[in-house]
Amino acid sequence: MTKENQKTSNRAVMRAVAIFVSNLSFDGEFQKQPIYLQEVFEVLLKTEFGNDLILRQKMLSCLKTSRDLVKVLSQFTDKQIQKACDNVIMVKAV
């Protein structure tokens, strides 16, 4: 991959992440997502399918990622997050 392609690829990735984060605010209370995941996982763990170590590790990883995202974004208002995402989305690849 050439340097020029890398730059375009990095911008495309950042644009996709910005769109994802921006869409979170439209899905309703993203700060409650870790709680929702935990509730789902607790129900699943009571089933035969939940008795799987690899699945449990994946669930914990999902919860950690979700909690980390909430922690990072909690210092900002929804309006600030939306404005920042809009600015990133508007950047054009050169």
Image (cartoon, rainbow, N blue to C red):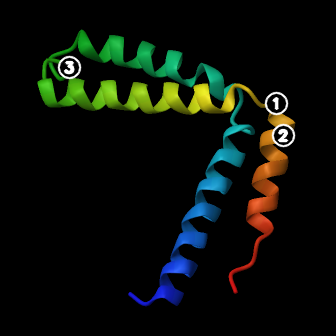
Q: Secondary structure at mark 2?
A: helix
Residue 2 in the image: above or below residue 16: below
Q: Residue at x 73, y 37 (%)?
A: 25
| N-terminal-most mark, 2 or 3 | 3
Q: Residue at x 21, y 29 (%)?
A: 55
Q: Residue 80 shows which numbered tag?
A: 2
Please state if 20 lies on the left or on the right of 89 as rendered: left
Please state if 52 lies on the left or on the right of 5 as rendered: left
| N-terminal-most mark, 3 or 1 | 3
Residue 76 is drawn in which quadrant?
top right
Please state if 34 lies on the left or on the right of 58 as rendered: right
- Tell me if mark 1 has few (under 14), some (14-19) or many (20+) residues whose alpha carbon lies within 10 angstroms of its own: few
Residue 50 in the image: above or below residue 20: above
Q: Residue 77 shows which numbered tag?
A: 1
Residue 24 in the image: above or below residue 20: above
Q: Residue 50 shows which numbered tag?
A: 3
Amino acid type assigned to the residue bearing label 2 in the image:
Gln
Tell me, yes or no, whether the two marked residues, 1 and 2, touch with CB atoms within 8 Å.
yes
Q: CA distance from mark 2 to mark 3?
A: 39 Å
Residue 15 is drawn in which quadrant?
bottom right
Q: Nearer the viewer, residue 60 or 14?
A: 14
Q: CA distance from mark 3 to mark 1?
A: 36 Å
Q: Secondary structure at mark 3?
A: loop
Q: Residue at x 61, y 32 (%)?
A: 72
Amino acid type assigned to the residue bearing label 3 in the image:
Gly
Q: Nearer the viewer, residue 77 or 22?
A: 77
- Tell me if mark 2 has few (under 14), some (14-19) or many (20+) residues whose alpha carbon lies within 10 angstroms of its own: few
- Tell me if mark 3 has few (under 14), some (14-19) or many (20+) residues whose alpha carbon lies within 10 angstroms of its own: some
Residue 72 in the image: above or below residue 93: above
Q: How far across and how far down the image is residue 35, in percent?
A: 52, 15
Tell me, yes or no, whether the two marked residues, 2 and 3, touch with CB atoms within 8 Å.
no
Give the farthest residue toward the front.
3
